[in-house]
Image (cartoon, rainbow, N blue to C red):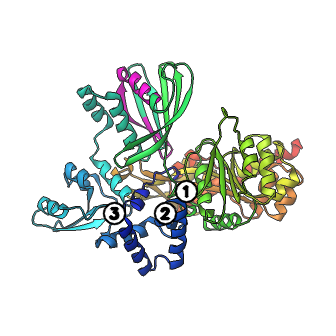
Amino acid sequence: MGFFASRFNFLAIVFFVNNNDVDKIKQILLEKQYVSQEDVSQAEAYAEKHQTSFLAFLLLQQILTKDLVGQAIAEYYGVSYADLNSRIPSAEQVRMIPEKIGKQYRVVLFDADDEARFVVTTDYPDQEGLLDILKSLFSGKEVVLSYSLSEDIDQALVHYRSSLETRFSKIIETQKRVAPEILDEIFSDAIVLRASDIHFEPQPKYVLIRFRIDGILLEAGRIPMEYYENIVNRVKIAAGLRIDEHFAAQDGSMRHERENNSADLRISIVPTLEGEKIVVRVLAEYVQNFALHGLGLSTANQDMLEKVSHKPFGMILVVGPTGSGKTTTLYSLVKFVNRPDINIMTIEDPVEYRVMGVNQIQVSEQKKLTFARGLRSIVRQDPDVILVGEIRDRETVEISVNAALTGHLLFSTFHSNDAATAIPRLLDMGAEPFLLASTLELVIAQRLVRRLCEVCRHSVSMSSDEVATRYGASVAQRFPGKMVTFYQGKGCSSCGQTGYRGRVGIFEFIHVSPEMKALILRGPSSAEIWDLARSQGSQRVFDDGVEKVNAGLTSIEELMRVVEPTSSSSEKKIRSSRAKIV
């Protein structure tokens, strides 16, 4: 979230309306046939049971997209809908409205038709006096109001922000509440910029602040070392940690709330040679944006995943290294199967996202609540679907396999470099071959690559020889033809000059077919599993990435940064060498 790992503030839209507004929006949705009466009835029943909005259910079940709801809300206000995602405003465009007016009234210049007609968008079009203010600002021009989603307005207003260091200097000059105000600025920037992690890294003379955005760490600013002790203590107090402990690792959590920016924050503090380093994981409050169709799955793989997830029992595993988007995929799957008539329970370490309608349990070593113990309790709670955050040991393997065998649909993650290796590892951890063959339905391996910015993406042509010289023969094999077209990002204000905005998954699927079940019974090697899977249509993670390179979703450089290509000849060598060892 994911994604992969993006923040989603749609609940601000869902809950700001009063009952009369909801009834009007509901009527518009029905009249425009965005939803059926049956959809609305189910949504209202769900909303009453879970104390939420009927719109939240429609989004959760992917009956509506956020843009369709945006169009309905715009129609309620009697204005047009301005999609700031399809036409991202530039910094110069945003700053044509003075900062004070832009922030106070949450308005963004969406379009200027030959500077004679200005379309200004906001998430509150009915603000009293707003149109008069804009007309006086653009004197002699026609000014038209439109509606945009709150999260898109927030993203556009980022262009008013000065650098963190400039704001730090102004805060330090006041000599008042330095630590809390600096933290507020850092946390707010991280949320707006969709950072997944914040790093406070003490150096001899200053503290380096870095944000991890789309999987890459970027410098955000620097704080003079003399103010860092107060900042550390402020974080410790808010996270419920000991302020007198400086030589041991500590973990905690806190919440940041400021205007429209809010998020749960998971805190990790460890001692280093230069002082205590803080890493903050920024967590979205809800996962309304997680959907299977947004993960980057091919049509065939998504159809397979949906088909398997409709089965009454069995096991679906998602494997890959830390930071590969496994949690996002699992929650998207939970969201897909979540209905009012089933009981979904999870056990996680930690619970990163709270999901409406799902019963979630936090692992606690202090309370002796491990994955295995929690899972034993869950199976006595009459669940239909179980999510196990991670399979780590033999006991969890055995309980998970038995739970999947006795009428439960079980989702979990597992640390493995590829899908084929996961099966032998599970067998080595104690899973009985006949039980694993009876329960395992699907193994998914994945990685995350940065998505090219749609605003500054451009194409580049290369000859096949140039591709081979620059990227290697194994890569050139994937791009047949004398000339090859790749895509790159130039860098612009929309993507922070990186050329990338957001991330997309690349996947490797192994479906446990009857032939695969028979193979598992014999205790196969990963090479044998992959040979069979490939003969049945599976493809490597890198090859799925090649398809996304061809589609212009990512660059070949980004793909090769994340995963190494495997040539067909090297796979043959691996298989032959293993055969000799046997």
Q: Nearer the viewer, residue 566 or 474?
A: 566
Q: Say which residue label 2 marks.
A: 56
Q: Say which residue label 1 marks.
A: 356
- Residue at position x 54%, y 77% in the image: 38
The residue segment tinted magenta is 210-236
User: What SS does tag 2 mark?
Assistant: helix
The quadrant where residue 344 appears: bottom right
User: What SS does tag 1 mark?
Assistant: loop
Query: Is the residue 350 above or below the residue 439 in the image?
Result: above
The amino acid beneath tag 3 is Ser
- Residue at position x 87%, y 59% in the image: 518
| Residue 148, numbered label | 3
Q: Nearer the viewer, residue 51 or 215?
A: 51
Where residue 69 appears, as percent x and y from the top left, is 42, 68
The amino acid beneath tag 2 is Ala
Query: Is the residue 254 above or below the residue 294 in the image?
Result: above
Is 422 left or right of 44, judged from the image as shown?
Answer: right
- Residue at position x 39%, y 43% in the image: 257
Crowd band around label 2 with a 10 angstrom C-alpha radius: few (<14), some (14–19), many (20+): many
Where residue 128 appears, as percent x and y from the top left, is 20, 62
The amino acid beneath tag 1 is Met
Tell me, yes or no, whether the highlighted magenta stretch contains residue 335: no
**Cα–Cα span, label 3 and label 1:** 25 Å
Q: Of label 3 and label 2, which has the lower sequence position? A: 2
Q: Nearer the viewer, residue 393 or 211?
A: 393
Is 433 left or right of 247, judged from the image as shown?
Answer: right
Where residue 166 appears, as percent x and y from the top left, is 27, 34
- Residue at position x 51%, y 44% in the image: 215
Is 380 left or right of 209, judged from the image as shown?
Answer: right
